[in-house]
Amino acid sequence: MFGDMMNMMGKLKETQQKVEDTKKRLDTVLIDEKSNDDKVKVTLTANRTIKSIEIDETLLEDKEQLEDYLIFTLNKAIEKATQVNEAELAAVAKEGMPNIPGLDMFK
């Protein structure tokens, strides 16, 4: 019993380290998104940090239109990055879940 508990604690620490390693790796995973007409392009990490924004010069003449483009394109990129982030972290967490009877609902 005590050995099982120590084994689970060790596995938990190992999983926590894997989660931290995955978060660091997600800083290097880049998500590119663009508007339908390619006038705005954004790149962000899977941890949702914006790395670059490219704006077509024609949009600089209309502030409202530029804002709409940025909102739409950034939201699409953030949604994609969130999906990648959650999938990667969920996979690591699932892999590290100890086999405890009755808790198989999390697998």
Image (cartoon, grey):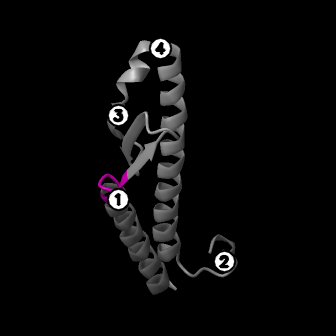
Dot in front, 4 or 1: 4
In this rendering, position of residue 71 left or right of residue 19: right
> Residue drawn at (47%, 62%), measured in percent from left and top?
89
Dot in front, 4 or 3: 4
Mark 1, residue position: 20
- 3 or 2: tag closer to the N-terminus: 3
- 1 or 2: tag closer to the N-terminus: 1
Mark 4 and mark 2 in contact? Answer it, CB < 8 Å.
Answer: no
Dot in front, 1 or 3: 3
Quarter of the image for the C terminus: give it: bottom right
Badge 2 marks a residue whose secondary structure is helix
Instruction: Tell me the amino acid under the disc marked 3.
Output: Ile
Badge 4 marks a residue whose secondary structure is loop
Q: Residues within 10 Å of mark 4 (few under 14, many from 20)?
A: few
Which image quarter: residue 42? top left
In-front residue for pair 7/30: 30
Which image quarter: residue 44? top left
Q: Which mark is residue 62?
A: 4
Mark 2, residue position: 104
Mark 3, residue position: 53
- What x and y, as percent, mark residue 28? 29, 55
- The magenta segment is 25-30
> Residue drawn at (42%, 44%), measured in percent from left and top?
48
- Cα separation between marks 1 and 3: 28 Å
